[in-house]
Image: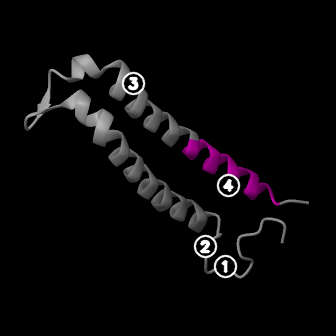
Amino acid sequence: MKDPRFADYWRKNIRLIWILLIIWGFVSLVCGIILVKPLNTITIGSVPLGFWIAQQGSIWVFVALIFFYAWRMDRIDHKYRLDSDDDSGGDPDQ
């Protein structure tokens, strides 16, 4: 029988993934495509914000979300004692 803490662990993992995908989708789709004209009224240096988000911003947000995911999952792994130091290798079936 599986330990119930693994169900909670995976629930938190999947929830975090969904939240980060929604943020990335919002930035890339909504800010980069749908709201590009209103955002173009704001400039970064001499570049319109909507253009910058469509060309660079969504990529930078994606990279930041990857680092955030790694940091947050490290904390969740530690909370559930699934660190890389764990002898079981993090396999929930052991």
Q: Earlier in the sequence, mark 3 or mark 1?
A: 3
Q: Residue 71 placed where, x, y %? A: 46, 61
Q: Which residues are magenta?
A: 3-17
- Image quadrant where one finds the N terminus: bottom right
Residue, disc 3: 30
Which type of secondary structure does the marked residue at label 4 adopt? Answer: helix
- Residue 47 magenta-highlighted: no
Q: Earlier in the sequence, mark 2 or mark 4?
A: 4
Nearest the eye: 57 or 77? 57
Residue located 65% across and 69% down the image: 82
Q: Earlier in the sequence, mark 3 or mark 4?
A: 4
| Label 3–label 4 contact, CB within 8 A | no
Nearest the eye: 87 or 23? 23
Q: Residue 40 placed where, x, y %? A: 19, 23
What amino acid is found at the position of numbered circle 2 in the picture? Asp
Residue, disc 2: 83
Q: Nearer the viewer, mark 2 or mark 3?
A: 3
Q: Nearer the viewer, mark 3 or mark 1?
A: 3
Residue, disc 4: 9
Q: Earlier in the sequence, mark 4 or mark 1?
A: 4
Give the number of the disc on residue 56: none
Q: In this image, 28 relative to 21: left or right?
A: left
Give the Cα separation between the discs numbered 1 and 2. 5 Å
Which type of secondary structure does the marked residue at label 2 adopt? Answer: loop
Residue, disc 1: 86
Give the Cα separation between the discs numbered 2 and 4. 13 Å
| Label 2–label 3 contact, CB within 8 A | no
What amino acid is found at the position of numbered circle 1 in the picture? Asp
Label 3, residues with CA under 10 Å away: few <14, some 14-19, many ≥20: few
